[in-house]
Amino acid sequence: MRNPLADKVVDIKPSGIRKFFDIVSEMEDAISLGVGEPDFDTPWHIRDEGIYSLEKGRTFYTSNAGLKDLKIEICNYIKRTQGIEYDYNHETIVTVGGSEAIDIALRAMANAGDEVLLPQPSYVSYEPCAILANAVPVIIELKAENEFRLTAQEILDAVTDKTKVLILPFPNNPTGAIMEREDLDEIAKVIIEKDLFVISDEIYAELTYDKKHVSIASLPGMKERTILINGFSKAYAMTGWRLGYACGPEIIMEQMLKIHQFAIMCAPTTSQYAAVEALRNGDDDVRQMREAYNQRRRYLLHTFKEMGLECFEPFGAFYVFPCIKEFGMTSEEFADRFLREEKVAVVPGTAFGGCGEGFVRISYAYSLENLKIAIGKLRNFVERLRREQAEK
């Protein structure tokens, strides 16, 4: 019997996040700080709109690209927040989460052998999606001393005549790093000079704590080179609704839509009606959740400083990325031992790329009460490791 499997799929490693998620699910009284999922319920007025759509019998397919009203609201929202104008009919697609948008953007843009520049540490799906699109991922290792920001020089050092796409994952998962306007200005010059395209994953755009998020698509000459991806999971606490969107040049969106219509048909209808309400009336919900996350962020940074655990200050998303190199163990060893001994799950930095070695990701998308319990256990664990080192 011949091998029924595709080699490129077999060679892809499973997500490093799921391993610890699965272990903690089997442990009684364990606390997980590993999953990037808001602990807030979807706001009631958004849920009500989804419920109302079901009561009205709106259980049909929508158009492949999404509800007209939703696409209009997406374009209005981006214009209001970023100053970018998109045509709802030709430059906007509603997808099954931001993850689908990443996948179909890469498949629509990459020919076999094209290189995709991928800054790491970053979200676990980018590299596998590039491989499944028959592209060649080229890793750019972001540096802690640069606050894990991407620099123009790092792009120049990585680019070749085969490079076609840069993935721009900011605000960043897992580091919480952001890119400011001056950072993007320098990068945009290189992108235009080298004739590259950008997939800008802005799923955490609404969750920044110091300066307002700036999309690279808003810079001169960049809208026609950028696929802007966002969604409703993080900002509106709508992870299970599975809804995202992509905006970009019509020539690219036409091809993305073909993949979407054959593989997916359309995003969930109920979710789309709820999302219209989120965009129209959800600004206060986002603000309240952002303020709560910021309180948790400040608590973690203060506590890390007290315990002498090195961690740069993240200004986006809802993650911190403390350094654990002082303990002389790998990130996976640290996370595994912490889980076994203290029943608290964090994610090894290596789940997000090899350069994440020496770090762990801690999500603060959890209640302050649970964070205080978990960080108390982390303090005990860190003190125990330091005693062990002193006794050697």
Image (spheres, rainbow, N blue to C red):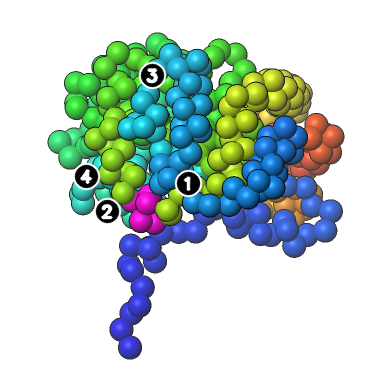
**Mark with earlier residue (3, 4):** 3
Q: Quadrant of the N terminus?
A: bottom left
**Mark with earlier residue (4, 2):** 4
Q: Determine whether 298 is above or below 159 in the image.
A: above
- Residue at point 45%, 59% (across, down): 13
Q: Where does label 4 land, which residue?
A: 114
- Residue at point 69%, 42% (across, down): 52
Q: Where does label 1 land, which residue?
A: 62
Given this view, does label 2 or label 1 mark the residue nearer the observer?
A: 1
Residue 134 disc label: 2
Specify whether residue 261 is painted magenta: yes
Q: Residues within 10 Å of mark 4 (few under 14, many from 20)?
A: many
Stretch in magenta: 259-263
Q: Amino acid at mark 3?
A: Glu
**Mark with earlier residue (2, 1):** 1
Specify whether residue 160 is painted magenta: no
